[in-house]
Image (tube, rainbow, N blue to C red):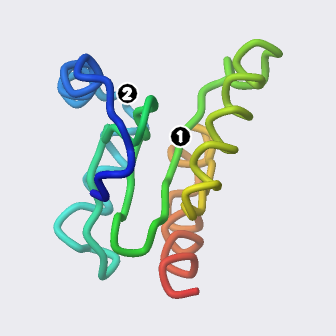
Amino acid sequence: MPHFLTIPPDNWRKARELRKNLTPAERIMWHSIRRRALGAEFRRQYPIGPFIVDFVCLDKKLIVELDGGGHMESEQAKYDGERVGFLQARSFRIRRYFNNDILQNLDGVLQDIFVALNE
């Protein structure tokens, strides 16, 4: 990871905790993309600057975020907007999917991620 991103020390601990407590959708996604299953290496619950992203392919600068229903609420939406701005300013591309997308249309989500990896 480039050293221009300052990561608060506590974020490494938080990321470890998040990796231990994946949601069902995160668990399914991780089992589907780990070990270069889509031809690229992903990391899960990874700190980038002051944020922890769900999944990231550092080589392709692609972030995959899984959202529950709470991301529709105004406070969370505002936070997500700040997060997206920070990450895009550092040349990351972001793909967001609702948990239901993972549970009901995993093949479609994986196809979309594969396409994004190869853009």
Which structural element holds mark 2? Answer: loop
Q: Residue furthest bottom?
A: 118
Q: Nearer the viewer, residue 116 or 25?
A: 116
Q: Residue at x 31, y 58 (%)?
A: 2
Identify residue type, mark 2.
Answer: Thr
Q: CA distance from mark 2 to mark 1?
A: 10 Å
Identify residue type, mark 1.
Answer: Leu
Q: Quadrant of the N terminus?
A: bottom left
Q: Residue at x 29, y 52 (%)?
A: 3
Which residue was labeled with disc 1? 66
Residue 55 image position (x, y, % from top left):
38, 49
Q: Residue at x 31, y 24 (%)?
A: 8
Residue 101 image position (x, y, % from top left):
61, 47
Q: Quadrant of the C terminus?
A: bottom right
Asked whether, in this view, residue 51 is left or right of residue 88, the answer is left
Q: Residue at x 30, y 82 (%)?
A: 39
Q: Is residue 20 above or below residue 40?
A: above
Q: Report the number of numbered marks.
A: 2
Residue 50 falls in image quadrant: top left
Residue 45 image position (x, y, % from top left):
32, 37
Say the numbered circle drawn on residue 23: 2
Q: Is residue 96 above or below residue 54?
A: below
